[in-house]
Image (cartoon, rainbow, N blue to C red):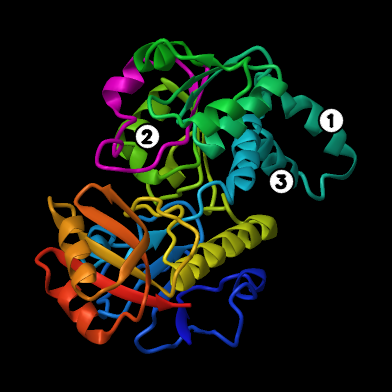
Amino acid sequence: MFKIQTLNKIAAIGLDRLPRDNYETASELSSPDAILVRSADMLQMAFQDNLLAIGRAGAGVNNIPVDKCTSQGIVVFNTPGANANAVKELAILSLLIGSRRVIPGIEFVKTLKGKGAEFTNLVEKNKGQFTGPEIMGKKLGVMGLGAIGVMVANSAVALGMEVEGHDPFISVEHAWNLSHEVKKAKGLDRLIATSDYITLHVPQTEQTKGFINAEKIARMKKGVRIINMSRGGLIVEKDVIEALKNGQIGAYITDFASDALLDAPNTICLPHLGASTPEAEDNCAVMVADQVKDFMENGNILNSVNFPNTSIERQGDARITIVNRNVPNMVGQFSTVLADAKLNILEMINKSRGEVAYNLVDVTGTVTPEIVAKLKKIDGVIKVRVLEK
């Protein structure tokens, strides 16, 4: 019986993927084998030795101490692409409401309540202050061509925009999905300098934190409109606010509100609505539950942010999973222990990612506690697990 703790509400359609005869799921569990989470802050949590995995129902993992998890052999999963359409729709909405001044117009009309016969004349007299440009024919610079960025770029093309994208690490899969009408940017500096609209779809890392700063803003077109549906930390907030005040930035639309931004001109702050659709929540819940289930039952890893994707079909009497530091001669030591125990290796895969490596070993024979103890004693081994048929 696997014990799965839920730190946030996970859609029932996802939890239903974990059969009750083999899984116990609850928000209050001691010593869970895995944790499912959405936005709950885990940064200060202590993890017991038996914790094997954390499944994030969403793409960002800023709320999870990934480095600490890696050092303890805890696999952190996320669900890239599961909420992509929801975020894409919000980004396209942001393009429109950032141009047409719809929200200020709506707020103005509300002030006319009770004006009676004057109402229509007041509307017509004041509508000019809410004029905004069309997006058709304008240039959109898409920074980041992952699942969301590709969908935004393709949708913007369909809306008649000229679209250029920048992503030096675009995957083959995402490249295949990208419209042929999306142009490859000839450089990030040129993209920044020539775009009427810029939309951010990159993760927040040490390299991207504060990416939009005064120096980059100064190279942008005057009046550029910036959409940030990714992470608040991608911008230097004081630089963006100053540029909004002096008109260098024409509008800033973000899903990451802050107290300071609320007073900035031409700013629309959304309350982190990117994945807040029932469809996205269901997609994330199903995806993360399936990934955690396959890992718990078979040791396979798909869509981990700290471990390599590792998967083989089960065969033999048992599967041994081994997490170790990524140093030389580990596989040879594992093989020696298993050979001395007269276990026949039917299939073995070893993959590494950064400082950690992961192994799946299918064997015939009985894997005794003594064998597991010998594997754990090897210098550099972090975790060993045996999965019986």
Mark seen at residue 241? 2
Q: Tell me the magenta residue range.
A: 196-224
Identify the residue shown where x is 37% and y is 17%.
188
Tell me which amino acid carries mark 3.
Thr
x, y percentage for residue 44? 25, 71
Of badges 2 and 1, the one in the foreground is 2
- Can I make out residue 39 in this image? no
Tell me which amino acid carries mark 2.
Ile
x, y percentage for residue 336? 17, 65
Q: Earlier in the sequence, mark 3 or mark 2?
A: 3
Q: Earlier in the sequence, mark 2 or mark 1?
A: 1
Residue labelled with disc 1 = 121
Circle 2 sits in a helix, a strand or a loop, which is it? helix
Q: Residues within 10 Å of mark 2 (few under 14, many from 20)?
A: many
Mark seen at residue 111? 3
Q: Of 31 and 359, which appears nearest the observer?
A: 359
